Image (cartoon, helix red, strand yellow):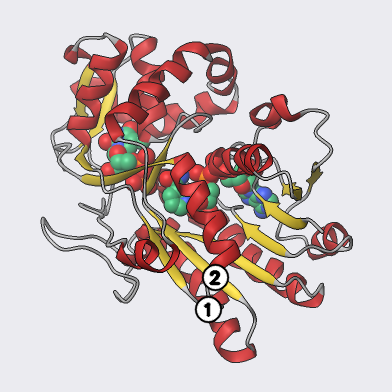
């Protein structure tokens, strides 16, 4: 008998890559994809899967208990919760919706999963729950969490909530905390797709502050393989860091992107910094290496070139995404910053 997955947020960036990769590589798996289709959810991300019988899309919110109960009525073995508000800058403009979706939504979904006797609940969390590092050191799974943005605080609350269910009720939950993902179908509000698409349109690239903040970049396919491995093999109640071992300063990523796109560095603008901006994230991934035999396989420079090529080939996709409501967001986030040349730092 095959494995039945219930994936939430499967029309977003990581979720859609996960759905595609699993269907391609695992003929024994079928799945329900439950997604509210917020601004970040896009059925076009899965257009190539039309007619695929092992994938069933259901529109609904993880905050809506009746909708979740109805979708779970068919039963499933493993639930993977990708659904979330995922952008730090938006959490600064509008924190409440992060509390609602990331905390209340996760709690509602978990409650429904317990009732529906789902075997295992996989919570997709983030390295941002650990807070910010100085120039040295790494986060291990034992590092106390110390989130700093409304986004990461809400993700931390959700990840602690599901672990509390394991501790108190013995619910089978596992948590993944990954570093910054990049790859195809990423919404162009995040650094890499925003800068690739702006560069292709000869628009300025707004680098926050001095641009020396560090992120550890992980190709989305590597993350999806790690998530599947954790879902199938991890011990109940366990937490796994998933990182790309590719720490880079934002300014270096920006320069590499401009080289890959063939555009000049004059497009770079240092603008006012993000409030409360985390300086550096870095993960110790020895636990997943040792216990589950997972390794990141995509070299950052190669993954970045492939991602640039994807955005070059898929102008229509991001052209459509960057219209409508996106423009209002872009104005709110960048207009004041980009006018008058912007400030270096705050
Ligand atoms: P995304 O913003 O691209 O996609 C989120 C998806 O969730 C969208 O399809 C959206 O429609 C859906 N969604 C939002 N609210 C919902 C609701 N109430 N009910 C059902 N669906 C809802 O996000 P992403 O970058 O793909 O991130 C997926 C998950 O991975 C998130 O939980 C995020 O916190 C986590 N994560 C992301 C990164 C990253 O670098 N992108 C890194 C670490 C962890
Ligand atoms: P982002 O992709 O938003 O991910 P996160 O904040 O979750 O790490 O941002 C990655 C880094 O790039 C982060 O240090 C903020 C910075 N950044 C900019 O400098 N300019 C931008 O316009 C954006 C969106 C991000």
Q: Position of residue 76 (x, y in %)?
A: 79, 62
Asked whether the beta carbons under mark 1 and mark 2 sit within 8 Å of each other, the answer is yes
Read off the residue under disc 2: 174
Image position of 212 with respect to 132: above or below? above
Q: Position of residue 212 (x, y in %)?
A: 14, 41
Q: Residues within 10 Å of mark 1 (few under 14, many from 20)?
A: many
Quick one: 119 or 130, which is closer to the camera? 119
Left or right for 302, reference 101: left
Between 201 and 282, which is closer to the camera in this rendering?
Answer: 282
Mark closer to the chain start, 1 or 2: 2
Distance between mark 1 and mark 2 Cα atoms: 5 Å
Instruction: Say if residue 335 shows up in the picture.
Output: no
Q: Which mark is residue 237?
A: 1
The answer to whether 50 appears left or right of 218 in the picture is: right
Which part of the image, by quadrant, shows the C terminus? top left
Quarter-of-image position of residue 11? top right
**183 sits to left or right of 317:** left
**From the viewer's perspective, is residue 268 above or below residue 346?**
above
Query: As drawn, is 157 to the left or to the right of 337?
Result: right
Q: Quadrant location of the N terminus?
A: bottom right
Q: Residue at x 19, y 21 (%)?
A: 341
Q: Position of residue 269 (x, y in %)?
A: 21, 23
Q: Residue at x 50, y 67 (%)?
A: 175
Residue at disc 2, secondary structure: strand
Q: Which numbered disc covers residue 217?
A: none
Q: Secondary structure at mark 1?
A: loop
Asked whether residue 233 is in view, the answer is yes
As drawn, 188 above or below 35? above
Residue 265: % across, % down = 18, 15
Residue drawn at point x = 54 percent, y = 43 percent: 14
């Amino acid at each position: 008998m095959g494995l039945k997955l219930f994936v939430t947020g499967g029309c977003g960036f990581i979720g859609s890559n996960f759905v595609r990769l699993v269907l391609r590589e695992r003929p024994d798996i079928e799945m329900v994809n439950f997604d509210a289709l917020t601004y970040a959810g896009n059925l076009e991300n899965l257009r190539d899967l039309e007619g695929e019988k092992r994938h069933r899309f259901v529109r609904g919110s993880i905050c809506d208990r009746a909708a979740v109960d109805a979708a779970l009525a068919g039963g499933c073995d493993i639930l993977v919760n990708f659904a979330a508000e995922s952008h730090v800058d938006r959490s600064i403009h509008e924190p409440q919706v992060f509390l609602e979706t990331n905390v209340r939504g996760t709690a509602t979904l978990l409650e429904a999963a317990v009732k529906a006797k789902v075997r295992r609940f996989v919570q997709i969390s983030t390295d941002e729950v650990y807070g910010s590092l100085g120039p040295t050191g790494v986060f291990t799974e034992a590092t106390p969490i110390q989130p700093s943005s409304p986004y990461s605080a809400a993700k931390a609350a959700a990840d602690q909530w599901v672990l509390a269910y394991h501790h108190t009720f013995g619910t089978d939950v596992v948590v993944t905390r990954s570093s910054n993902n990049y790859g195809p179908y990423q919404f162009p509000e995040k650094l890499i797709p925003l800068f690739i698409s702006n560069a292709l349109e000869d628009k300025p690239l707004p680098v926050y502050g001095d641009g020396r903040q560090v992120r550890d970049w992980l190709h989305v396919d590597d993350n999806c393989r790690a998530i599947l491995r954790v879902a199938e093999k991890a011990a109940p109640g366990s937490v796994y860091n998933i990182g790309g071992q590719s720490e880079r300063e934002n300014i270096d990523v920006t320069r590499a992107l401009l080289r890959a796109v063939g555009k000049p560095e004059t497009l770079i603008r240092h603008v006012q910094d993000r409030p409360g901006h985390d300086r550096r994230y870095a993960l110790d991934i020895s636990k997943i290496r040792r216990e589950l035999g997972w390794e990141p396989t995509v070299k950052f420079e190669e993954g970045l070139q492939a991602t640039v090529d994807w955005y070059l080939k898929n102008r229509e996709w991001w052209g459509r995404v960057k219209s409508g409501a996106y423009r209002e967001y872009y104005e709110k986030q960048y207009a004041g910053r980009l006018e008058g040349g912007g400030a270096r730092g705050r």
